[in-house]
Image (spheres, helix red, strand yellow):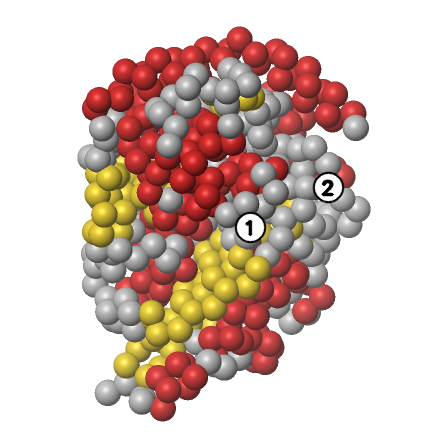
Amino acid sequence: MKKILTLGIDIGTGSTKAVLCDPAGTIVASAVHSNKISLPRPGYAEMDAEEDWWGSVVDVCREIIDSPAYHDAISRQSLLGAVCVSGLGPALVTTAGVDTRDKDSDVPLHKAILYGIDTRAEKQIADQNRILGEEAILARCGKSLSSQSLGPKIAWVRENIPGVTAESSWFSSHSYVVKRLTGQWVLDHHTASQCDPLYDVNVQDWAYEWVEKVLPGLRLPKLLWAGDVAGTVTDIASRETGLPVGTPVLAGTIDAWAEAYSAGVSSPGDLMLMYGSTMFMVQVLAAPAVSEKLWTTSGVVPNSHTLAAGMATSGSVTTWIQRLCGGIEFETLIEEASDVSAGSEGLLLLPYFAGERTPIYDPEARGLLMGLTLRHRRGHIFRAVYEGIAYGIRQIIEELERSAGRPARILAVGGGTQAALWTQIVSDVCAIEQIIPSVTVGASYGDALLAAQYLGAAGSDETWADEAVIVKPRSDISGVYDEMYQIYLDSYVANKHLMHRLAAIQGEL
C-alpha cells in the first residue's frame, strides 16, 4: 500500500518555506528560499511576484523533489498526494488576463503590493467609503476599510499602472502561485474576506453590486475554501517545479491563518499569537462578531469565522535595533535585556515604525522612544522594544475581549517564540498564559495538514500540534506594567499630531 505524502508551501516576506510530511505529521524533507521586500518610498512595500513568489516556489519544490529523502520515500512506495500553498497577504499583483493557454497572461504588470504595511491607497479608501458608506462597509464586510483592505489597492492600480484594465486578473501571493501551478484562477474565502469592500462576510460570497459600484467591470475569481482543490499540476508547471503532472493543488490561504491552523487554533475561543516580522493574532469565533477596531473574516474551513488583528511591526523592530547595534548577536542583546528590570527603568517605545494597523488604523503613526537618560544602555532599549510590542498586544487583546469574549486558549507561534524573554514579557504585560506548540514550523505545516485532510490521510478535526511549553504570567510585576501600559496609551494620543507632521515631512523626501 502506498504511503501518501503531502507538500506544504508558504510564501513569506523573508523566505518561502516548504515541508514534505507523512500522514502522522512527521517532516520528511524541508526547504527554504530567501525573499526580499522593497520599500521604494514612504508608504510603499513591494515584492517581485515573478522572482520572489513564483521563483521561490520553483526553487523549494526543486529542492524537495531532488532531495535524497524524497527519492528514498518514493523508492519505498510513497506517493506525493497533494500540494497546498499559503502566502503573505492580502497582497496584490495584476496580470493581463486569465487565458490558461497563454503563458504571457501570467506576466505581472507591476510589482506586487503588500498587505497593511503598504499605505499608498489612502485616497481610494476615502473614495470607496464615500461611495458605499463607512457604517454599511463595517456591517457588511466585518471591518472598516484600512491599508489592509485590497479593494482600494485594486482601484489604485487601475488609476496608476498603465495596461491595467477591467479585463485584467488580480491575485494575492498564494493564488498567483496556484494559477501558475494549475492554470486555474481561484481565491479562498478567507483571502476574499480581506478584499474589502468586495466580499460580504455574512453570506460568505462576493458583494457583486458593490463590486460594480467601486470597480466597474472587475473580474472575480472563483471562490473556494482553503482545503478545496483548485486544479492539478500542469505539464508546464511540472517542467519548472519538478512536481508530478496531475498532482492535486489546494486553494490555500493567507499565511497567518494557515499557521493558526498548524498550531491547532480551530475551536471557538482559541487565539493565535504569531511572533514574526509583524505581530498577527487570529481568534476563532462561534458566530460573526463585528469590531470597529479589528477584522472579522471568514476562516479556513467551510462556514467558519475569525476575528483578527495585526500590528504593522514586531520582529522587524528587533532586527532594526540589532543592526543599529552593529549586528551584535541577538543572544547578547537578550541577555543584556534580561538584566534590566520590568518597565526598562522608565523607558517606553511605541513600535509604529511602519504606521500601525489595528487597533488605531493610523498609517502616519511613527515610532517613539521616550524617557531616555544617560543611564540607559542598549539592554534597556532592547527590552523596551519587547515591552512596547507587548503593550500593543495587550491593547488588541482588550479589544478582542470586548467584541468576542476573553480568549479561552492562547497559542503562540512563529520565530519570535524562540526568545523566552519576549514571550515571558508578553505574558507578564497582558496577564495571559501562552501555549507554545512543540512544532512551530509555520504556515507550511498547516498547508501540509490541509492537504492530508483533503486526501483522508488525516482526520478533519485532527491536529499535528503538541503542547511543549506553557508561559505563565508573573503577578509580582503587574503593577509596573499596568502603569507603563497606561503611559503607552496616553503617549500616542499626546503625540499623534506631531507624528503626522513628521510623516508629512518624510513623504516629501
- Find the distance from the CA under tag 2 to the CA under tag 1: 15 Å
Residue 403, horizontal then vertical, whole percent = 30, 24
Q: Position of residue 293 (x, y in %)?
A: 42, 23
Extreme front residue here? 375
Residue flagged by tag 2: what amino acid is it? Pro
The residue wearing badge 2 is 40
Q: Which residue occupies 46% across, 80% down?
A: 67
Residue at the location (47% across, 32% down)? 379
Front one among 110 and 336: 336
Secondary structure at numbered mark 2? loop
Question: Where is residue 3 drawn, in percent x and y?
Answer: 28, 81
Q: Quadrant of the N terminus?
A: bottom left
> Mark 2 touching mark 1, by CB under 8 A?
no
Residue 192 shows up from this direction: no
Query: Is 285 above or below relative to 474?
Result: below
> Toward which corner of the image does residue 475 lie, by quadrant?
top left
Say whether residue 112 is left or right of residue 392.
Answer: right
- Give the number of the disc on residue 13: 1
